[in-house]
Amino acid sequence: MKSNLRNEIKSYIVRQGMTMQEVVDLLSDEYGWSDSVSNLSNKLQRESLRYTEAVQLADVLGYDIVWQKRQEK
């Protein structure tokens, strides 16, 4: 499961035509994150990204995280 989450987030980065370095630079500028690509890579690898960090990451990529009630079966 770990690689699925990491790959999903990396796919959003690629879809935006960005590199990990560009994303890290934006996160550093906007939210004061470390400017280290390895720091973000390690968080994705370990699945240790906090929810607030996920929201910030989505923001710099131009996405909103939306909570949607599942359809009952």
Image (cartoon, rainbow, N blue to C red):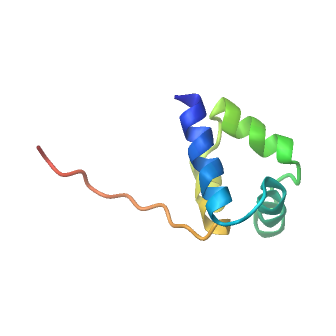
Residue plotted at (60% across, 71% down): 62
**Left or right: 68, with 35 as reference point:** left
Q: Which image quarter holds the C terminus?
A: top left
Of 67 and 24, nearer the camera is: 24
Residue plotted at (31% across, 58% down): 68
**Left or right: 24, with 70 as reference point:** right
Extreme residue in the right direction = 35
Q: Is residue 52 above or below residue 49?
A: below
User: Looking at the picture, how far across and down is residue 2, in whole percent?
Assistant: 58, 30
User: Looking at the picture, how far across and down is residue 65, in whole percent?
Assistant: 48, 61
Of 41 and 32, nearer the camera is: 41
Quadrant location of residue 49? top right
Looking at the rendered structure, the number of numbered marks drawn on it comes to 0
Quadrant location of residue 3? top right
Extreme residue in the left direction = 73
Quadrant location of residue 35? bottom right
Residue plotted at (62% across, 40% down): 6
Of 17 and 54, nearer the camera is: 17
Q: Is residue 28 above or below residue 72?
A: below
Q: Is residue 46 above or below residue 72?
A: above
User: Looking at the picture, how far across and down is residue 60, in whole percent?
Assistant: 68, 67
User: Looking at the picture, how far across and down is residue 9, in whole percent?
Assistant: 61, 49
Q: Is residue 15 above or below residue 54?
A: below
**Left or right: 65, with 61 as reference point:** left
